Image (tube, grey):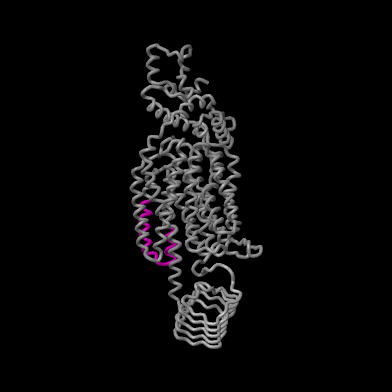
Amino acid sequence: MADLYFHFFPRRYYRGDSQAANDDDGGHSDSTEGHDEDDEIYEGEYQGIPRADSDKGNLRRKDQEELAQQYETILQECGHGKFQWTLYFVLGLALMADGVEIFVVGFVLPSAEKDMCLSEPNKSMLGLIVYFGMMVGAFLWGALADRIGRRQSLLICLSINSIFSFFSSFVQGYSTFLFCRLLSGVGIGGSIPIVFSYYSEFLAQEKRGEHLSWLCMFWMIGGIYASAMAWAIIPHYGWSFQMGSAYQFHSWRVFVLVCAFPSVAAIAALNAMPESPRFYLENGKHDEGWMILKQVHDTNMRAKGYPERVFSVSILTLRISFKTLSSSGQEHPEYKRTTFMLMAVWFTMSFSYYGLTVWFPDMIKYIQKQEYESKTKTFTKERVEHVTFNFTLENQVHRQGHYFNDKFLNLKMKSMVFEDSVFEECYFEDITSTHTFFRNCTFIASLFYNTDLFKYRFVNCKLVNSTFLHNKEGCMLDFSDDFNNAYMIYFVSFLGTLAVLPGNIVSALLMDKIGRLRMLAGSSVISCISCFFLMFGNSESGMIALLCLFGGISIASWSALDVITVELYPSDKRTTAFGFLNALCKLAAVLGISIFQSFVGITKAVPILFAAGALAAGSFLATKLPETRGQVLQ
């Protein structure tokens, strides 16, 4: 046992400099009197009491570094195999749930706004509320994971996400739906910092960069899953039922329900996985940590065909050595020097990435609208008498017309505008309208029966002896399939997330070869350059191609940033720091989305320059960070 013990933990680690000097002179302290010299350990240190000498800070820091190296040696003995791959897929489901959460609200808005009568401010709030929730969740669960454990915190946050995602598919009112999506975001907000920290503590140094990058792929798979499910479910409006006029359950609610499946599956799978052994060792639970390390070792050895290979690290080894680690309380030397720089990199990347990825679809919609309006037909001073309109009227402007004894029966009016016109003895029945307005018109002895032509559609109009009967109840809002084609939205999102996968694969293969900083700075520079091509994206297909290009390039930056963040911080502060930075990421996303959206239809130059400038600043700041390739996990 003694030979095995000192193989992993050299004697010099347990003996302070002053005590070693006394030993050389042949002196012994009272606390070690009667003990064999080879087993000599400072009694107070064994009990978790720090030495009272002037060099205790340096000793503790040295202790941490040596213990990190010794933990790395243990992980190498455990090997990389079945256990890590099983955990990879389990944590991948949790990361997939985070990716799904980002897309859910954007996909359901076109349908949900009908059911909930959402105004433009309400739609904007619903789109941003998820980011606010995830911001709170990242900070909360990241800090909690350093105190109660990675696995326990992840189970709690996934459970909250699942519960409120489920409720949000059934609630009817806007405020309750908003509340449920907020809490759903709070729940899933902690998944990214916990998942990466959790997985990293089972990975040896030579595997860490590559396999953390592979883990990033599940976030993109979550986006693909959400896009595919929206494409398959939401357009099927027949998948619905209602109970009177008070309760409606349409296809978009089925989609919200289906989007909770990755979170539920992650909870079920996570129950079969152990806590991080590094967390247990940090908190003095050495027996539990040893059992998990032995489980990792035995699982991998059996899968590789070496069931007879014995785990050589003893419980006593971990109990004695990591007692010092759990009581050291020292920060990683890079913690204070790099946190501010890392905050700046996270902020600039999030501001540009989220701002552009939301701005792209809005620009596509604007281009579609411009193209649609370019085909508008205009009619002036027409006189129409005794005519029955029973066909769709679409994309027309009628000025100074006179309509006498005309009938508008069972038809749709899409993007119709009547200005300075007179309707005399006209009859409107079973009318469905979108983007239709009457401005400065006069209605004389006209009847409106079972139409959705509410009074707000009549701008500065005169109604003389005119009657409205059985007007359709519902939201007084405009909806048009032409400007918001469901299939196009889902297809574009599907292509955008699919295009990211090649970049993710390349970044995973190169992460440990070229280093984290080169990957981060290089990808940011190329992303910055690609922004300028947006100036030339004047068509729908061109914008989609640029969206795919930008996403495929920028994913390498995100992979490198996740790996660097995990490796820079010590185990007792890892998820807290990662959670704080991820919360800052969501704050930057809200700011970027709000600013970029305000320029849609005004100019492309400002958003492009903002994004390019932020990416350039981020790539420069990234070069100031320390390279973590080849370092053991502190």
- Placement of 578 over or under 257, stated as above or below: above
Quarter holding the C terminus? top left
- In the image: residue 422, left or right of residue 344: right
Residue 624 on the magenta span = no
Q: How many marks?
A: 0
- The residue furthest right is 243
Q: What type of secondary structure mainly makes up the magenta span?
A: helix
Q: In the rendering, at what x and y percent does residue 260 appear?
A: 58, 52
User: Residue 592's quadrant in the figure?
Assistant: bottom left
Q: In the rendering, at what x and y percent does residue 608 appear?
A: 36, 59
Task: For residue 221, say whether it is visible.
Answer: no
Residue drawn at point x = 50 percent, y = 47 percent: 189
Task: Find the magenta span and give its range.
Answer: 524-548
- In the image: residue 76, left or right of residue 260: left
User: Residue 244's quadrant in the figure?
Assistant: bottom right
Which residue occupies the foreground of this view, 594 or 634?
Answer: 594
- Placement of 230 over or under 568, stated as above or below: below
Which residue occupies the foreground of this view, 301 or 219?
Answer: 219
- Placement of 188 over or under 534, stated as above or below: above
Q: In the rendering, at what x and y percent does residue 310 appear?
A: 56, 28
Residue drawn at point x = 49 percent, y = 60 percent: 122
Task: For residue 187, say whether it is visible.
Answer: yes
Q: In the rendering, at what x and y percent does residue 349 appear?
A: 40, 51
- In the image: residue 324, left or right of residue 609: right
